[in-house]
Structures are given as C-alpha cells and as structure tokens.
Image (spheres, rainbow, N blue to C red):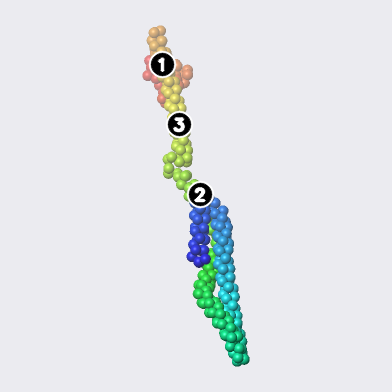
Amino acid sequence: MSKQSIFGRISTLIRANVNSLIDQAEDPEKMIDQLVRDYTNNIAEAESAIAETIGQLRLLERDTAEDKKEAAEWGNKALAASRKGDELRAAGDTAGADKFDNLAKVAIQRQVQTEGELKSIEPQIQQQQVVVDKLKDGLNGMKVKLDQLKSKRNELVARSKVADAQNKVYDAVKSVDVMDPTSELGRFEEKVRRQEALSTGKQELAASSLDAQFESLEDIGELTEVEARLAALQSGGRPGSIAAGRRRGSGGSGAARRRGIGSARPSRFSDA
C-alpha cells in the first residue's frame, strides 16, 4: 500500500467533510466541533491504514529473516555433506562419497535459490520502509494540525461571535436611519409635525373667532346709537342732547370706550 493512495483517500474524506460542514454551517461553534470530530476520525482511519502497511512490512521482514536462516541452513547442510563425502572418499568409498557430493550440490542449489529470493525482496523492504517513514511523518503532521485546531477552537468561536454581534449592530444601525423618510423614525417625526400643524391651525382659528366676536359687539353698539338718535329726532328732541345724556348716564357705550372716547370729552351738541 503506497503513501499516495492512503493519504489521497484520507485527503478526499477530509475535503468532503469540510465542504459539507461549510455548506451546512449555521452555528460556527458546532461546525468547528464537528470538524474536530471528523478530523479525529480521519486520523484514526489513517492510523489504521498505516498500521496495516507497517504490519505488511514487518511480515515481509520476518519472511526475509526466515529466508536468510534457511539459506544459512542449506549452506551448513552443503558443508556437512561435502565433508562427509571427503571422509568416505578418503576411506575408499567412492560411491558413498559421490552420493554425499550430490547432496552437497542440492543443498548449495537450494541455498543459491533462497539467496536469490532474498536479493529480490530486500529492495521491496527498503522501499516499503521509506513509505512507512513518510506515512508516520504525515500522520504526525495531521496530529499536530489537529492539536492546533483544538487549541484555536475557542479563539475561532470567540471571533465568530464578535463578528456576528458586529453584523447585527451594523444591521440595526442601518435599519434606523434618521435621514431616511421611509424609516420608522422618519414616519413618527412626520406624524408629530402634522399634530403640531393641527394645533397651530386650531389656535389661529380660535383667535380669529374671538376677534370676530369683539367686532360684532362694536357693530351692535353703533346700531344702538343710531337708533337712539333717530328716535329723538322723530320725537322732536335734539339728537345731541340725547347722545350726551346717554354718555353721561352710562359713561359711554362699550364701542365708544374701546375707541378711546371718554365721558369728559364735550359733545358736539353740548352747547346747543
């Protein structure tokens, strides 16, 4: 199992989980916690895959050690058979010597075969050891990143909450714009202005009505004076004496007093 295939699968899982969390993120704190859990699970999967790779390497190393031991044993057997053949040849037993020589050749052949297998396996072991070392380094790097994520969790959550609060403040300020006539404050101000205008109108209307009442009183006083003088003329009296008498008796009409005519001022008819 290669380093690229293991970490390629893990990276795909991580990207899929992160993208899914970002797309569905509503609560940043929950998102970060879920990210930590998913990243922890991915590391566990990586550890399992790396452990399997290491196990295969160790199994291959054990097989290699057994092959080395077997090659050494075949070498010993070849040596023992060769020595036995030499002894029998020295004793004059040529047939027996040839038999053990053949056994020695078989042992040497097996030894050579085993050593050939070892030569083909050793590069695989070295390559697999390099892969395992890189996998371990990558796993350690993932654990370091996980620790960093855990240590920054509170900071990220706090920053997210501050940013959310700021956005809410900005939205609230934007929604209450005193210069905006369509805002609630603008509509309330317009309502107050209409109420003030209505109050001013009522005040002016009340003042004009009061002035009209006083003017009507003046008009009534003048009509009364005219009627009195006309009645005096019709009865053969003097209108001036009647008017003076009215002024002396009553102190002047209300309309005359408002015009500034006092009772002490002589009438045009007083000398007649």
Answer few, some or many: residues within 10 Å of disc 2's Cα (few below 14, many 20 plus, some between 14 and 19): few
Q: Secondary structure at mark 2?
A: helix
- Mark whose residue sits in front, 1 or 3: 3
Point out the tag, 2 or 1, that comes first from the N-terminus: 2
Point out the tag, 3 or 2, that comes first from the N-terminus: 2
Which quarter of the rendering shows the C terminus?
A: top left
Q: Secondary structure at mark 3?
A: helix
Residue 60 in sight here: yes
Point out the tag, 1 or 3, that comes first from the N-terminus: 3
| Label 2 – label 1 distance at C-alpha | 77 Å
Where does label 3 land, which residue?
198
The three-letter amino acid code for the residue at tag 2 is Lys
Q: Which residue is nearer to you in this view: 265 or 129? A: 129
Where does label 2 land, which residue?
168
Where does label 1 land, which residue?
223
Relative to 179, say whether 45 is above or below.
Answer: below
Answer few, some or many: residues within 10 Å of disc 1's Cα (few below 14, many 20 plus, some between 14 and 19): few
Q: Which mark is residue 139?
A: none
Relative to 25, say whether 63 is above or below.
Answer: below
